[in-house]
Amino acid sequence: MDGKWSKKKIDKVIDIISEYIELHDLNSIALKKLHPSRSSKNLRLLVSRIKALAAKKKIKVYQYSIKELEDFYLTEERHNKRTLVEKLVSDYPFLINELEKERAHKNPYHLRMFEAVALGAACFHKQYK
């Protein structure tokens, strides 16, 4: 699915998400809130399609901004994505290898993976804690 966004690509992503919902009997989806000036029209379309799929399947959607995740996980007055990642690794030590990979790259490569873990954990806490 490399290349530019297209209707076909968005449909494929929705099909994959639908398969995961059925395969794992999911009851919720966690999404990162999109920043209006930092997201494309196609990404906004994809999110709206995911929300429509969730509504159709009666699945709860939880959305968090990075700021909300930082506030949820971190108690220090000043925090950022790096301190969020460090907190995630302290809570989930199996992520240490991914943190080491991240530190080895000049450009943040695995940051999105850490954001996804934070989203999933926040969603879990919202439902079960």
Image: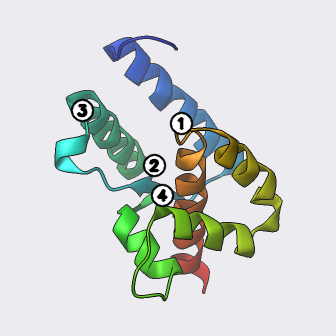
Color encoding of the figure: rainbow
Which type of secondary structure does the marked residue at label 3 adopt? loop
Relative placement, left or right, of 30 versus 44 is right
**Residue beneath label 4, please?**
30
Please determine whether, in this image, residue 114 is positioned above or below residue 37.
below
Q: CA distance from mark 2 to mark 4?
A: 15 Å
Earlier in the chain: of badge 1 and badge 4, it is: 1
Q: Is residue 36 visible?
A: yes
Q: Is the residue under label 2 in contact with that under label 1 (CB below 8 Å)? A: yes
**Residue beneath label 1, please?**
18
Q: CA distance from mark 2 to mark 3?
A: 26 Å
Snapshot quadrant of residue 46: top left
**Mark 2 residue type:** Lys
Q: Which mark is residue 57?
A: 2
The residue closer to the viewer here, 89 or 105, is 105
Task: Pinpoint residue 22: horizontal percent, then vertical percent.
Answer: 63, 42
Q: Residues within 10 Å of mark 4 (few under 14, many from 20)?
A: some
Which type of secondary structure does the marked residue at label 1 adopt? helix
Earlier in the chain: of badge 4 and badge 3, it is: 4
Q: Is the residue under label 3 in contact with that under label 4 (CB below 8 Å)? A: no
Relative placement, left or right, of 99 versus 126 is right
Task: Pinpoint residue 98: horizontal percent, then vertical percent.
Answer: 73, 49
Q: Residues within 10 Å of mark 3 (few under 14, many from 20)?
A: few
